[in-house]
Image (cartoon, rainbow, N blue to C red):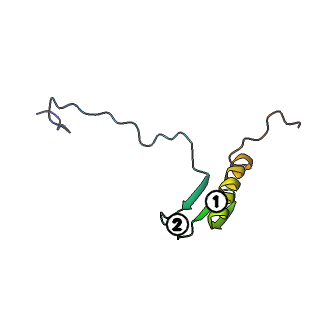
Amino acid sequence: MGEPKGVAEGVPTAVRPDPSKDDGRRPVAWLTIVAPSSWSVTPSARSWCTCGYERHAIGRAAVLQLVAAHTEHRTACPLLTPESEGRAA
């Protein structure tokens, strides 16, 4: 008698990508904004990064400022920007 088969003969099997494959990318900075649909409710936001940067904001103007600060941090964060090339030793 032959070896047991995992599927019925003649049934095609799908080859799936290897789930253990990793491209090395990881989330580093997050921006969460809570803006309820009602204008009577105050929006809030939180910006944080794995480098230790963390800010909170409450109110429309403060949330807009936090969004700008989060964007600025992403351009200056040591975890997101590669070190300058061609440094003198």
Which residue is the site of mark 1?
48
In the image as oriented, which residue stretches furthest toward the front?
A: 39
Residue for point 71% across, 52% down = 73
On screen, residue 33 above or below 2: below
Q: Secondary structure at mark 1?
A: strand
* Image spot of residue 5 (x, y percent): 18, 37
On residue 8, the disc is: none
Q: Secondary structure at mark 2?
A: loop
55 sits to left or right of 83: left
* Image spot of residue 77 (x, y percent): 72, 50
In the image as oriented, which residue stretches furthest toward the top?
A: 10
77 sits to left or right of 88: left
Which residue is the site of mark 2?
39
Count of numbered labels shown in the rendering: 2
Residue for point 59% across, 55% down = 30
Quarter holding the C terminus is top right
Amino acid carrying mark 1 in the image: Trp
> Marks 2/1: CA distance?
26 Å
Residue 19 position by quadrant:
top left
Amino acid carrying mark 2 in the image: Trp
On screen, residue 65 above or below 80: below
